Amino acid sequence: TPFMLLFLYHILIIFIALVEKLADIKLKKPSSETLESMAESSSLQFVFSHVIPSAEGHKNPKVQSEALAWMETVLPQFGIASIKSRDLVAFLKSSLESSNVAVRKGATAVFVLLRIHIGPGATIEGENAN
C-alpha cells in the first residue's frame, strides 16, 4: 500500500541520519542511544539491516568506523544469536578491504567478537557463518 511505502521510506531516512550522526562528536551519544532503543523495541537484526547499508554506502570513513564501533558495543548486549551473521560478515569483509585504517580496525574488532561468540565457524568468507 502507498502508506506502507511512505512509512518504510521515512524509516530509511531516519536510519541514514542516525548512522551519519554517529560520526558527529556532539550527536554520537544520542544517535547511539536511539539506535539501541530501536533495537530493543524491534530487533537488533532489523536495526543492523538498515545500519549496514547506510554505513557501507557512506563516503565518509568516519561514519563507517563509528558504525562498526557501535556494532561492537551492542553485539555483546543483545547477543550474536539475534542477528544474521552472513550479512554482517559480508559487511565486515568489505570493510576489511577499506583503505582507511580506522574502518579496518573496527571491522577486525567486530569480526573478533563474532569469532569469540560463534567459534571457528565464523569465517571471513562467510560460508560457514550462521
Image: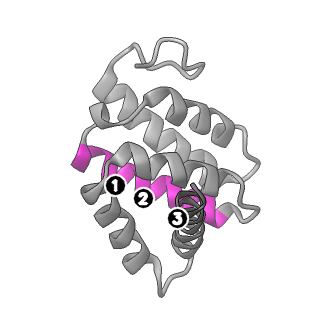
Whether residue 124 is situated above or below residue 27 in the rendered picture = above
Residue 70 is labelled as: 2
User: Considering the numbered disc 2 on the image, is that residue within a helix, a strand or a loop?
Assistant: helix
Structural crowding at the residue carrying mark 3, measured as other residues with C-alpha within 10 Å and reported as few (<14), some (14–19) or many (≥20): few
Q: Is residue 73 magenta?
A: yes
**Where residue 44 sits: x, y (%)?**
35, 48
Mark 1 residue type: Thr
Residue 9 is labelled as: none
Whether residue 95 is situated above or below residue 30 in the rendered picture = above
Structural crowding at the residue carrying mark 2, measured as other residues with C-alpha within 10 Å and reported as few (<14), some (14–19) or many (≥20): many
**Range drawn in magenta:** 62-78
- Residue at the (54%, 43%) spot, across then down: 107
Q: Is residue 49 magenta?
A: no
Q: Nearer the viewer, residue 12 or 112?
A: 12
User: Of helix, strand and loop, which mostly describes the magenta segment?
Assistant: helix
User: Considering the numbered disc 3 on the image, is that residue within a helix, a strand or a loop?
Assistant: helix
Do tag 2 and tag 1 residues touch (Cβ < 8 Å)? yes
Q: How is the image coloured?
A: one colour
Whether residue 106 is situated above or below residue 4 in the rendered picture = above
Residue to which mark 3 is pinned: 7
**Where residue 32 sits: x, y (%)?**
39, 69
Residue most extreme to the bottom: 26
Mark 3 residue type: Phe
Structural crowding at the residue carrying mark 1, measured as other residues with C-alpha within 10 Å and reported as few (<14), some (14–19) or many (≥20): some
Depth-wise, is mark 3 or mark 2 nearer the camera?
A: 3
Residue 40 placement, left or right of 35: left
- Residue at the (44%, 29%) spot, across then down: 85
Rounded to the nearest angstrom, the CA distance separating label 2 from label 1 is: 5 Å
Residue 73 is labelled as: 1
